[in-house]
Image (tube, rainbow, N blue to C red):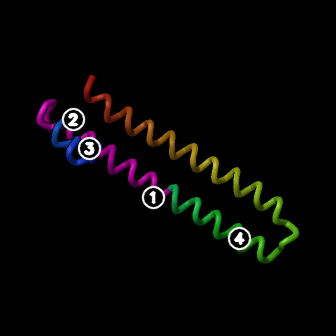
């Protein structure tokens, strides 16, 4: 499997510097998306754990809200990854 810098160098040689930079930018964007999503879901899990520790009787409601929030974050992350990939792929058409 090729890493992102090798792919950017290969594409830059064939299609000009713009295509290589598009791949590099997409890779950086996808990395930032993953880091942001990980941090967001980590915050949700940590705060939910603290909330359950303070009010154990509300654990069911807290769990449901935590799962819904995490699913929304994951959905936006997947949408962003697909969007970044499509933008980078637009240079090759």
Between the C-alphas of marks 1 and 3, the distance is: 21 Å
Residue extent of the magenta highlight: 11-36
Determine the residue located farthest toward the front in the rendered image.
1
Assess disc 4: are there few (<14), some (14-19) or many (≥20) residues with their C-alpha within 10 Å of its C-alpha: some
Q: Position of residue 68 (x, y in %)?
A: 70, 50
- Which label's residue is closer to the chain start, 4 or 3? 3
**Label 2 SS:** helix
Is residue 31 in the magenta section? yes
Q: Is residue 59 above or below residue 31?
A: below
Q: Which mark is residue 69?
A: none
Asked if marks 1 and 2 touch (Cβ < 8 Å), the reply is: no
Between the C-alphas of marks 4 and 3, the distance is: 39 Å
- Which label's residue is closer to the chain start, 4 or 2? 2
Between the C-alphas of marks 1 and 2, the distance is: 24 Å
Residue depth check, mark 1 versus mark 3: number of the one nearer the observer: 3
Return the residue at label 1.
35
**Label 3 SS:** loop
Does 31 sit left or right of 11 as displayed? right
> Which of the 4 quarters of the picture holds residue 92?
top left
Q: Kindly identify the residue that appears in the image at 19 percent across and 35 percent down.
A: 11
Q: Position of residue 23 (x, y in %)?
A: 27, 41
């Amino acid at each position: 499997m090729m890493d992102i810098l090798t792919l950017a160098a290969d594409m830059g040689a064939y299609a000009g510097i713009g295509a290589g930079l598009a791949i590099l930018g997409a890779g950086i964007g996808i990395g930032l998306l993953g880091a942001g999503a990980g941090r967001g879901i980590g915050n949700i899990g940590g705060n939910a754990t603290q909330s359950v520790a303070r009010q154990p009787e509300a654990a069911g409601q807290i769990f449901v809200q935590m799962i819904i929030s995490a699913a929304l974050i994951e959905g936006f992350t997947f949408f962003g990854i697909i969007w970044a990939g499509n933008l980078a792929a637009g240079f090759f058409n």
